[in-house]
Structure formats: structure tokens, C-alpha cells
């Protein structure tokens, strides 16, 4: 009798678990495309916030450098991603890097980091996050202007050893009651600047190739 009862309850629990798993899988699959589209639109909007339209005369959305697979991990990227290159009269003026700060309070924080050709930051934007409302979400420009504090900074301003939040002895403010989120973004932004200095020539070489291909196409 007892064995039959246990078996019946186990069967009911198994059915419940399968139904729950199926529901979660359906919700994930039905919303994944919508979330991806929203992230794409946010990224496109952020591109133009980071580099104003008067600074470039090329097709910013389509002038890109494909980040080699071997280098994606340097920016904590999990999928194929591109650097957008802003040019004026054929000269590169800024580069916009995708990056992920993996150590946010609630996981990944997706970023776009704009770097001027002189190595200074033209702007940083949070594209998506799951940080705590009212605390970590202050990294979002819609919640506070903290993210604008990166504008004009470089690996030399402040000095490299000052690229931390103030609680850790650095120059960057943290949020009241939330240190983990700004700490993660400061760390990743510095790593983007280091990536830029390391791969700048490689990116510029790709730009020359793009221009050569474009000129060749115009003469055909």
C-alpha cells in the first residue's frame, strides 16, 4: 500500500516537473527573438549616442571589423561580434567596441564602449543588464548620468593604477549601496581600452582593406 502511494506521488511529481520544464522552455523560445531584437535596437541607438553624427561621414552601422574568434574572450564576448568604425574623409575618428562585464551583481552586463582614435573614451553605454532596480541599474543612462563619467578618460587619465572605484582606492564613484556593478563596468571599460591599444593597427589595416574594396567596386 505504502509502495503504491510513493509510486503514485513520484509519478505526479515527475509530471509536474516535465510540465514546468516545458513551460519554461516555451517561454524562453518565444521571447528569445524579441529580446535579441530589443538589444539590437538599443545597441544601434547607443552607437549614435557614443559618436555624434557630425563626427563621421561614413555608414557607421556597416563599417565594421569582425573580431576574430581567438580575441573574443578578451572582451568576454560569447558570440561573433563586430567593432564599428567611424570615419571622416577616410580617416578613422572613433571605434565602438562591444564588451561584456561578466561580474555584475546579477551576471553579465553588456556594454558598448566608444574609443576615439587618440585612445580617449567617447562614451560608454549599458546595452542590457539584470542588475537590481534602484541600485545597480544606475549604470543605465535612463537612471543616472554616472556612465557619462567615463567620457574623455584614457589609460593615462587617470593613471592605470587609478582605474578602480573609490572604495578600492581608484578615481571612479560607486553607487550608494551598490559597489559591485560600477566595479565590474570600470574593470571592463579599462580592458576595452587595453584591447584597443593592443589591436589598433589590426583594426586600421582592416579599414584600409574596406576602403580599397569600396574604391575597386566604384571603378567596376
Image (tube, rainbow, N blue to C red):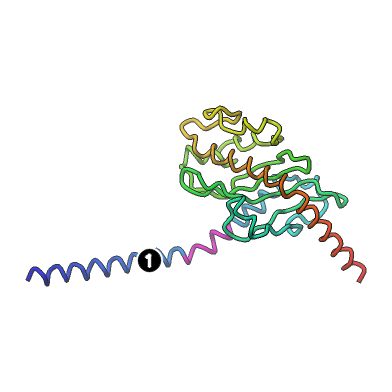
- Within the magenta stretch, is there residue 83? no
User: Neighbour class for label 1 at 10 Å: few (<14), some, many (≥20)?
Assistant: few
Closer-to-camera residue (75/37): 75
Q: Nearer the viewer, residue 95 or 175?
A: 95
| Residue under numbered circle 1 | 23
Hey, which residue is sitting farthest left in the picture? Answer: 1
Magenta-drawn stretch, dominant element (helix, strand or loop): helix
Residue at image location 53% in from the left, 48% down from the top: 102
Magenta residues span 29-38
Q: Quadrant of the C terminus?
A: bottom right
Relative height, residue 37 to residue 11 (above, below): above
- Residue 165 position, x and y percent, is 56, 32
Farthest residue to the right: give it: 219
Nearer to the camera, 116 or 146: 116
What residue is shown at x 71% (from left), y 35% (from top)?
A: 152
Q: Secondary structure at mark 1?
A: helix
Compared to 91, does 160 lie above or below?
above
The residue drawn where x is 87% and y is 68% is 217
Q: Horizontal placement of 140 versus 26: left or right?
A: right
Instruction: Where is residue 167? Give x, y as percent.
Output: 52, 28
Judge whether 91 appears above or below 154 on screen: below
Amino acid at each position: 500500500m505504502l509502495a503504491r502511494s510513493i509510486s503514485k506521488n513520484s509519478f505526479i511529481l515527475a509530471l509536474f516537473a516535465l510540465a514546468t520544464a516545458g513551460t519554461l522552455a516555451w517561454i524562453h523560445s518565444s521571447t528569445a527573438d524579441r529580446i535579441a531584437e530589443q538589444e539590437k535596437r538599443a545597441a544601434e541607438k547607443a552607437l549614435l549616442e557614443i559618436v555624434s553624427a557630425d563626427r563621421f561621414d561614413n555608414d557607421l552601422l556597416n563599417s565594421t571589423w569582425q573580431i576574430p574568434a581567438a580575441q573574443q574572450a578578451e572582451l568576454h564576448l560569447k558570440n561573433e561580434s563586430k567593432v564599428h568604425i567611424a570615419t571622416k574623409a577616410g580617416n578613422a575618428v572613433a571605434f565602438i567596441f562591444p564588451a561584456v562585464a561578466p561580474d555584475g551583481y546579477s551576471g553579465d552586463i553588456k556594454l558598448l564602449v566608444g574609443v576615439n582614435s587618440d585612445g580617449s573614451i567617447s562614451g560608454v553605454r549599458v546595452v542590457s543588464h539584470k542588475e537590481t532596480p534602484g541600485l545597480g541599474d544606475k549604470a543605465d543612462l535612463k537612471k543616472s548620468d554616472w556612465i557619462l563619467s567615463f567620457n574623455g578618460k584614457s589609460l593615462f587619465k587617470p593613471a592605470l593604477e587609478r582605474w578602480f572605484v573609490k572604495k578600492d582606492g581608484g578615481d571612479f564613484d560607486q553607487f550608494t549601496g551598490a559597489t559591485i556593478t560600477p566595479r565590474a563596468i570600470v574593470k571592463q571599460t579599462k580592458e576595452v581600452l587595453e584591447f584597443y591599444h593592443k589591436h589598433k593597427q589590426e583594426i586600421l589595416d582592416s579599414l584600409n582593406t574596406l576602403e580599397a574594396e569600396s574604391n575597386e567596386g566604384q571603378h567596376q
